[in-house]
Image (spheres, rainbow, N blue to C red):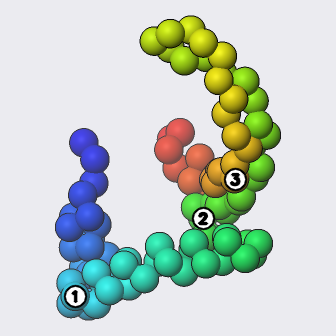
Amino acid sequence: MALTKDQLIADIAEAIDAPKTTARNALDQLGPIVADQLETGGEITWPAHGKPKVTERPARTGRNPSTGAAIEIPAKKVIKLVVAKGLTDAVNK
């Protein structure tokens, strides 16, 4: 079962002994901060979780699944998460 945003906010608020509004505001600000840092070429390290990195995906030729026609897929930037060893070890216990 997936953890919902409300459940995550409640867990964060309980863990730091703060109101849910404080936890919600902090969580809402995380996305824009990460996006700004990655957009400018910066790095982010989340201790015990991993590092999101921007990589370039080159242009390539693909196929339209319904017609089989060849189509050009343009190059783009993608975000990948390099997972920390501690998180991997925690999942594989």
Q: Quadrant of residue 40?
A: bottom right
Mark 3 lies on residue: 77
- Give the mark, 2 or 3, whose residue is nearer the N terminus: 2
What is the three-letter code of the residue carrying label 3?
Lys
**31 sits to left or right of 60:** left
Residue at 66%, 16% in the rendered image: 70
Residue at 54%, 80% in the rendered image: 33
Residue at 75%, 52% in the rendered image: 55
* Pointer 1 local density, CA inside 10 Å: few below 14, some 14–19, many at least 20: few
Q: CA distance from mark 2 to mark 3?
A: 25 Å
Q: Nearer the viewer, mark 1 or mark 3?
A: 3
Tell me the quadrant of the picture where the N terminus can be found.
top left
Residue 66 screen position, x and y as percent: 45, 12
Q: Secondary structure at mark 1?
A: helix
Q: CA distance from mark 1 to mark 3?
A: 34 Å
- Give the mark, 1 or 3, whose residue is nearer the N terminus: 1
What is the three-letter code of the residue carrying label 1?
Thr
Q: Nearer the viewer, mark 1 or mark 2?
A: 1
Residue 82 seen in render: no
Q: Secondary structure at mark 2?
A: loop
- Give the mark, 1 or 2, whose residue is nearer the N terminus: 1
What is the three-letter code of the residue carrying label 2?
Ala
**9 sits to left or right of 66:** left
Verify CB contact (< 8 Å) between mark 1 and mark 2: no
Residue 42 position (above or below residue 82): below
Residue 47 position (above or below residue 93): below
Mark 1 lies on residue: 21
Q: Secondary structure at mark 3?
A: strand
Mark 2 lies on residue: 48
Residue 64 position (above or below residue 30): above
**18 sits to left or right of 76:** left
